[in-house]
Amino acid sequence: MGRYVVRRLFMAVPVLLGTTFIIYLAVYALPGDPIQALAGPNRVLSPSVEQALRERHHLDEPLLVQYGLYLTGLLSGDMGMSLTGRPVSEVVAVGWPVTFQLGVTAWLIMSVLGVLLGAAAGMRRGGLADAVVLGGTTLVMGVPFFVVAYVAQIVLGINLGWLPVSGTEAGWPLSYVLPGLVLALYGLPQVARLTRGSVLETLGADHVGTATAKGLPRRAVMVRHVLRNSLIPVVSLLGVSLGYLLSGTVLIEGIFNLPGLGYQIFTAIPQHDGPVVVGVGTLLVLVFLLVNLMVDLLYGILDPRIRLD
């Protein structure tokens, strides 16, 4: 197990480098001048001030040199300086708690509802629960989530007044339930359908038939023999989904006015603020890789037949 963890960590290094370079290249390829974007459309910088800003942020260097300088600083714990003069580490420190709480809230909603709905549909194949789950997930997948976000704000927030529609003043969990619910719809249909299919497959396994023939109560058979084995592929999807949820908060944080990392990226891209975009992107990629490593390790706990060497 220890060798496996070390090997996976070493494998994550080229993935992290490649991803950060692609993000850096994408920011570099954006049309426009970041220094002029920083000054604003109605301001003209003097040549000396413009040159000083370019030298301070290494914008006068080739792309590979800029990326090398960024990696050198990153290895020493320096995430760089935004074009506004604010350390990227400070931007991350302020925005990360908001994004983390939003992502975890959405993940919990997606995991609990997805597994419960999928298990109920699988155990009652062809029944009302199965039809409702299949029809509901199909409907959710066909509606853009930003449309759901605005409808949820109007109905649940404004008309009914059940939940806040903007900001984080109410704290956790009230401020995060509504955006978390909307964000959870991103992956809830996949979790429910995968759980349903996995339950149906496990119900037909030999060990389930043997447990039933021995006279074990139906509840014990479902919990110990069906659900536990059915959750193995679901855990993989849930682990990957957590990374996607954390990195997919840009529009949600913009719609619900949440000052998280997604909102920072949303405002940094029009300003060509590459250090912020690359720094936040690097953090999200690292979280995604660590979550996938944890998922692989959970395989050995859920199914002892799996050995990680």
Image (cartoon, rainbow, N blue to C red):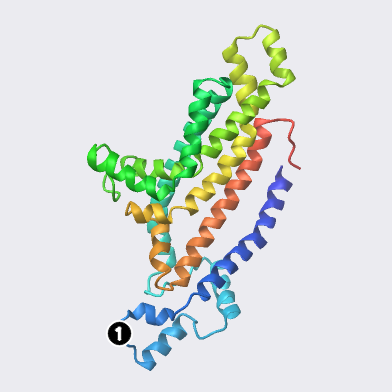
Q: Residue 234 location in percent, x, y?
A: 60, 35
- Report the number of discs: 1
Please give the name of the residue rendered at 45% of the width and 84% of the height, measured from the top-left corner. Answer: 54
Q: Residue 38 location in percent, x, y?
A: 36, 78
Q: Nearer the viewer, residue 117 or 79?
A: 117
| Whether residue 136 is situated above or below residue 27 in the rendered picture | above
Q: Residues within 10 Å of mark 1 (few under 14, many from 20)?
A: few
Q: Is residue 255 left or right of residue 8?
A: left
Q: Is residue 206 left or right of residue 61?
A: right
Please give the name of the residue rendered at 33% of the width and 51% of the height, measured from the top-left corner. Answer: 256
Q: Residue 252 location in percent, x, y?
A: 39, 52
The three-letter amino acid code for the residue at tag 1 is Arg
Q: Quadrant where the C terminus lies?
A: top right
| Whether residue 285 is situated above or below residue 187 in the rendered picture | below
Q: Quadrant where the N terminus lies?
A: top right
Q: Nearer the viewer, residue 93 or 257?
A: 257
Q: Is residue 132 left or right of residue 68?
A: left
Q: Residue 194 location in percent, x, y?
A: 60, 34
Circle 1 SS class:
loop
Q: Quadrant of residue 2?
A: top right
Task: Give the labeled residue for mark 1.
Answer: 43
Please give the name of the residue rendered at 46% of the width and 40% of the height, measured from the top-left corner. Answer: 140
Q: Nearer the viewer, residue 168 or 29?
A: 29
Q: Quadrant of residue 182?
A: top left
